[in-house]
Image (cartoon, rainbow, N blue to C red):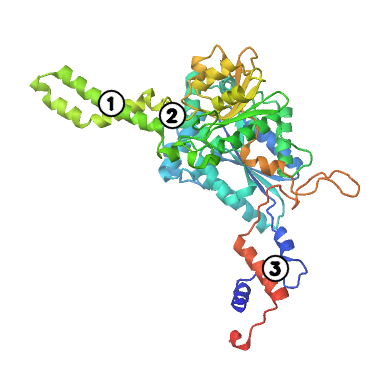
């Protein structure tokens, strides 16, 4: 078996120099990728031009070569897409933002690929790498991909570039977004059209920015486009990538990670939501998740064993949806009854009655889906994460909720919002929007999206996303010189990035290790018969 393995790895060849004194581990470490691939995602009007400028400046200060890939340029380039297809989908008479949205949607639809524009960016990157290899240019490069609008694009980039790919989500409060679009000479009608299409296009191949941005590794708020402030934020991000010593979580990052960790305990069949309540000093007071309450207080958890009566174990179904489906069936029955009552015995309308009756289910479906009935949350057995926090504080703490900040993975629904207002909390910070929520519509007297201390502030999260929290804030190497006590500038083990990505497949590294092990340790020599 060992002989056969030895012949196999020799046949394949190896990155390992047989005359080298390097161990396989040392050889593999040299195969780290030096490059970074940074995708940008943000809504139209988020100030992306300024972000690109500052990002390039910071990357160069970290000694990176910068390659800026504008998706909008690739979309119009006949080297990437057929000229005929570009012309068919490019409306030169439209406002610039609308024009680019229409072209992107049209290209995806024509080629029937939702990840299409990421493929174009990857092709550009490959072309750049080939050019550098031909010229024997050895640099570490940051590829800035500006910008991504669909989750499928991000998924493909992560599959290919793995740990070396980072997504920066650029967030901006609505009033600043509108102001920026006005400065681009967009009309008020165009502005709201741009925002709606950007958020979630009606086109199946359209933009899904609100969903794509949720996959960000870091969120950066860009309300005022102040370059100095923006530069500090991006420089910190580069410091975290490279394991710069002394960088620790902000209170907001700690709060959101605590909320996220709580969400992982939820077995709700609808969505996993977590919430965390912190004071101004960053002390964690309570966490909550959306799940089924149990007698005596609190929610069911895995530790309850046979006494765990969450929906997935109790019936295996979502009670909210099951109840709403009964309502939909009732709608169909009511429509039939009302038709009978209104048509009566008029024989001239029998044909119409039969036609409608035969299609009553689809009519009921339309009433259900196009009305607010489908958004009703009243019939769920779960309480929401925000309410769990409030009730936990009521059971466990004498401190109260007044003046505290709530971190939640998802924007509160209007039911939670009224309890948040009543509880006296001063601020809510969230990542994921929630379209069903009427919080601001119903409580605009008490809730605001601006920094107005007279009302409860609902604000978008800024900082390292939970998905990268552990990697960014857990040192992989020593923080100080054990002899002198001097702090190291960086505490990253493999001297490049905190989250290591290697250039080759694991199969290649299997060969490296196996080849050297068979040669130096097992000392397997093939018999004469094996060489024939």
Residue drawn at the location 8% of the way across and 22% of the way down: 347
Instruction: Please give left or right for residue 416 compared with residue 451 in the image.
Output: left
Instruction: Please give left or right for residue 420 compared with residue 398 in the image.
Output: left
User: Is any part of residue 380 visible from this angle?
Assistant: yes
Which mark is first along the chain, 3 or 1? Answer: 3
Within 10 Å of disc 2 (Cα), the crowding (few <14, some 14-19, many 20+) is many
Location of residue 79 with respect to 104 vertically, above or below? below
Q: Of circles 2 and 1, which is in front? A: 2
The residue under label 3 is: 16
x then y, percent, for residue 365: 30, 30
Which mark is first along the chain, 1 or 2? Answer: 1
x then y, percent, for residue 223: 64, 24
Q: Nearer the viewer, residue 117 or 296?
A: 296
Q: Quadrant location of the C terminus? A: bottom right
The residue under label 1 is: 330
Dividing the picture into quarters, in which one does residue 146 lie? top right
Is disc 1 in contact with disc 3, using a CB cutoff of under 8 Å?
Answer: no
Location of residue 64 with respect to 451 vertically, above or below? below
The residue under label 2 is: 380
Q: Which structural element holds mark 1?
A: helix
Within 10 Å of disc 1 (Cα), the crowding (few <14, some 14-19, many 20+) is few
Q: Which structural element holds mark 2?
A: loop
- Please give the label number shown on residue 43: none
Q: Of circles 1 and 3, which is in front? A: 1
Which mark is first along the chain, 3 or 2? Answer: 3
């Amino acid at each position: 078996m060992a002989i056969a393995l030895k012949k196999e790895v020799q046949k394949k060849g190896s990155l390992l120099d047989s005359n080298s004194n390097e161990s396989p581990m040392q050889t593999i470490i040299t195969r780290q990728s030096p490059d970074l691939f940074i995708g940008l995602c943000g809504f139209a009007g988020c100030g992306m031009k300024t972000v690109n400028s500052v990002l390039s400046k910071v990357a160069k200060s970290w000694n990176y070569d910068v390659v800026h890939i504008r998706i909008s340029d690739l979309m119009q380039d006949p080297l990437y897409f057929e000229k005929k297809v570009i012309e068919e989908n490019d409306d030169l008479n439209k406002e610039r933002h609308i024009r680019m949205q229409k072209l992107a949607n049209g290209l995806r639809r024509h080629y029937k690929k939702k990840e299409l524009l990421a493929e174009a960016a990857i092709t550009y990157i490959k072309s750049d790498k080939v050019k550098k290899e031909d010229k024997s240019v050895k640099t570490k490069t940051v590829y800035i991909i500006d910008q991504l609008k669909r989750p499928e694009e991000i998924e493909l980039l992560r599959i290919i570039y793995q740990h070396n790919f980072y997504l920066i989500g650029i967030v901006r409060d609505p009033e600043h977004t509108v102001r920026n679009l006005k400065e681009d000479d967009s009309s008020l009608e165009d502005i709201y059209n741009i925002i709606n299409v950007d958020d979630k296009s009606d086109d199946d191949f359209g933009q899904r920015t609100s969903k794509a941005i949720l996959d960000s590794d870091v969120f950066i708020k860009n309300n005022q486009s102040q370059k100095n402030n923006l530069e500090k934020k991006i420089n910190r991000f580069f410091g975290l990538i490279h394991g710069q010593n002394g960088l620790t979580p902000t209170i907001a990052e700690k709060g959101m990670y605590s909320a996220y960790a709580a969400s992982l305990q939820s077995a709700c069949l609808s969505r996993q939501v977590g919430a965390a309540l912190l004071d101004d000093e960053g002390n964690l007071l309570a966490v909550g998740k959306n799940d089924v309450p149990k007698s005596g207080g609190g929610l069911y958890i895995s530790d309850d064993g046979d006494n765990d009566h969450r929906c997935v174990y109790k019936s295996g179904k979502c009670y909210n949806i099951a109840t709403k489906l009964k309502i939909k069936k009732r709608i169909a029955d009511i429509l039939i009854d009302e038709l009978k009552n209104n048509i009566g015995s008029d024989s001239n309308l029998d044909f119409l009655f039969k036609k409608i009756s035969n299609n009553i289910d689809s009519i009921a479906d339309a009433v259900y889906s196009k009305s607010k009935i489908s958004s009703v949350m009243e019939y769920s057995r779960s309480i929401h994460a925000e309410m769990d926090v409030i009730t936990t504080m009521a059971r466990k703490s004498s401190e109260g909720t007044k003046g505290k900040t709530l971190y939640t993975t998802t924007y509160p629904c209007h039911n939670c919002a009224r309890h948040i207002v009543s509880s006296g909390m001063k601020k809510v910070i969230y990542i994921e929007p929630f379209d069903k929520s009427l919080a601001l519509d119903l409580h605009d007297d008490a809730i605001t999206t601006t920094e107005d201390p007279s009302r409860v502030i609902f604000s978008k999260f800024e900082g390292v996303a939970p998905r990268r929290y552990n990697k960014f804030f857990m040192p992989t190497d020593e923080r100080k010189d054990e002899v002198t006590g001097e702090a190291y500038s960086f505490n990253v083990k493999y001297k490049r990035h905190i989250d290591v990505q290697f250039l080759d497949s694991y199969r290649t590294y299997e060969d490296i290790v196996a080849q050297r092990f068979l040669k130096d340790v097992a000392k397997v020599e093939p018999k004469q018969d094996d060489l024939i």
